[in-house]
Image (cartoon, rainbow, N blue to C red):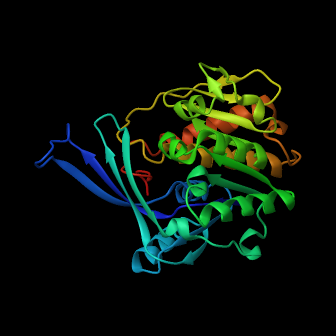
Amino acid sequence: MLGVLGDLVEDVVVWVAGPLRHGTDSAARVFRQRGGSAANVAAFAAGQCPVRFLGCVGDDPAGGGLAAELAGHGVDVRVAHRGRTGSIVVLIDDEGERTMLPDRGAATLLETVPDAWLDGLTHLHVPAYSFDGEPVGTTAVDALRRVRSAGGTTSLDASSTGMLEGFGRERFLALAEELAPSLLFANRSESAWLGLLVDGRPGPERARLAATTVVTKSGAEATTIDVPGQAPFTVPVPPVGEVRDLTGAGDAFAAGFLAAFLDARLTGAEPGAADVLGTSGLREAAARGHRCAARVLASPGASCAED
């Protein structure tokens, strides 16, 4: 079973019609959606593999509603209830690009992960957002260590250059080096900022993550997969008809990729590093991620047209 630990919040998605006009009205469409990178991964993965979400929401109607919505996708939801449920305002421009204004609220308040929440997990995925704030940062690191100690595999997502800048480049690299996840997902700007992949080649910090396969997304351009000890290779992204909102596309990619990764393990690959899949298996995982991501690009927030 796939476990995903992190944020479950409400996204207030604003599709802005043209440039924002300071000091007056700007035409827009507004949507309220379930959000949070970890919750999005769990929701998108639920139709592909068994998945459990671990997190904290507020002791309020919003938190209960979000947990119920996520469970409605088939996710095994395990949440604590403390404080006030978080919200993120997501401004979407005409090209689908996002500007996010996060108030994570209770998502940062996860204090403990009971043993029962980790029972049965073979893989734990944690977006880097979960390292930013306490007590959730300490809780996330502890959960990753416990899954590894029990023989499971782990993965991280770099999440956001804005978040990484506040958290600290060296601090994140040192933590990733210590945790040694099987997989690290990042987009092109995150991967370059961390010094992991620069202009399509391994960057100056790449050697520090000696046990980690780095998967670098680049929008409509090919995804680069860098397996330790091998030359990086790329997987092309098929053309997509409409791109209106990029929110959740990276989370959907991770969900598809991780589902393929776990499928490969269930069909005989030995647990451990991602390179047990081989090049063909990693290519198929990326292709599955691309297909999953393509489903969300025309819908508001982290949702699909068929939802």
Above or below residue 280? Residue 157 is below
Above or below residue 101? Residue 1 is below
Q: Quadrant of residue 95?
A: top left
Q: Quadrant of residue 10?
A: bottom left
Viewer-proximal residue among 201 and 18 = 201
Viewer-proximal residue among 194 and 113 = 194
Q: Residue at position x 53%, y 43% from top?
A: 250
- State whether residue 266 appears in this view: yes
Q: Report the side of 14 relative to 208 (left or right).
A: left
Q: Quadrant of residue 158?
A: top right
- State whether residue 51 appears in this view: no
Rendered location of residue 170, percent (x, y): 65, 40
**Is the N terminus in the top left, top right, bottom left or bottom right quadrant?**
bottom right
Rendered location of residue 180, percent (x, y): 78, 45
Q: Residue at position x 76%, y 42% from top?
A: 177
Viewer-proximal residue among 185 and 189 = 189
Q: Residue furthest left?
A: 24
Q: How many numbered marks does the figure carry?
A: 0
Q: Report the side of 24 relative to 234 (left or right).
A: left
Rendered location of residue 208, percent (x, y): 76, 34
**Is the C terminus in the top left, top right, bottom left or bottom right quadrant?**
bottom left
Above or below residue 291? Residue 305 is below
Rendered location of residue 184, percent (x, y): 68, 41
